[in-house]
Each structure stands twice: as C-alpha cells, then as structure tokens.
Amino acid sequence: MILLDKNRIERTIKRMSYQILEKAQTQSVCLVGLNERGYSLAQKIKTNLDEALDTSVTLKQLDSHDDSIPEFKSDEVKNSALFMIDDVIFSGQTMFKSIQKISELSGFEKIFVVVLVDRGHRKYPVLAGIVGVDAPTKLNEQVELRLKDDSPYEVVLIEK
C-alpha cells in the first residue's frame, strides 16, 4: 500500500524544511543524512534551505553500518544546530547509534532528530523533533522509502 506518493513527499519535505528553519532560529544549520535514504532526504531539505537562507547549509552523510564518521570543521559546529535525518524511525536503534558516532556533539547548540515517517514502537530513548508523517504500524509491517534516481519516490507499507 502506498502511504506517500512523490507529490506528497515533496510537500512534506518542504514543510519539514520550514520546521528546521524555525527550530534553528539564529543558528547555522548542519544536516546529517543517515544511510542512503536519509541522505537523499537531507539533500532535498538542503536544496529548500539553501533557497531560503543567505548562507549554504552543511550536509554530511553517515553510514550507520560501517565505521565511517562525519567530521565537522570548527566553524561548522560553532553556533550551529545539528539535524539528524532519516527516512523511517521505528525502534530508534539506528538513530541512537548514529548520534553516538558524532564526536563533536557537545559543540552544537541544539540537536534534533528529523524523520519522514515515524512508525512508533520505540525501544531506544530517541524522540523525533520533526516528523513528516506519523504512521503507527503493526509489528509485522514495514515502511519503506523507495528511491528513483537517488530521489525519494514513494513510501510504501509492506506486510511481512
């Protein structure tokens, strides 16, 4: 079942971009996209933010499945808000482990979790501050963001 089509995803990402601006207030914005899908969303958000701001937004990718760690320059961290972006949050494990990988965490003024879809069923103490869509699911269901040409195309609900 399709939860979000391409047009709705684009509208949702635009709304989330404005929410990021509101949360950041006067701070600079640093975006970290998790894995392939979170990074794809972060790229779309960055495009929206770059259009709205006079300065460029910092964008990094973090692969939660390997030991790669995004490194920030001191001017990227000072007076900045960090936004960790993923496609779907379920137990919170991926986000929790990813946040722990960033050594410069204490240098950021604020840290927010941003997700396109929140499924609920949290196991780890992670609260998404900006959510595109709340989609409570059953444990035997899965939510997947599909990409076409590295761009968000649709979000589907799959029964296992």
Image: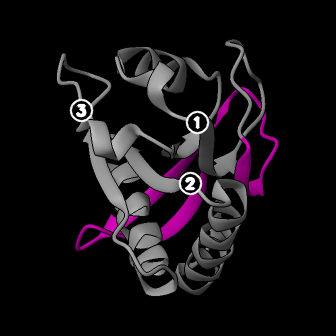
Q: Residue at x 77, y 24 (%)?
A: 121
> Does residue 84 belong to the magenta stretch?
no
Q: Quadrant of residue 137?
A: top right
Amino acid type at mark 1 = Glu
Question: Does residue 158 show up?
Answer: no
Q: Which residue is mark 3?
A: 70
- Asked whether disc 1 touches disc 2, contact meaning CB atoms under 8 Å apart, the reply is yes
Q: Which residues make up the magenta segment?
A: 129-157
Q: Which mark is residue 109?
A: 1
Q: Residue at x 31, y 54 (%)?
A: 59
Pick the residue in front: 74 or 66.
Answer: 74
Mark 3 / mark 2, whichever is N-terminal: 2
Q: Residue at x 71, y 44 (%)?
A: 118
Pick the residue in front: 160 or 42.
Answer: 42
The Cα atoms of the two marked residues, 1 and 2, are separated by: 8 Å
| Residue 90 rendering spot, x and y as whole percentages | 64, 30
Q: Nearer the viewer, mark 1 or mark 3?
A: 1
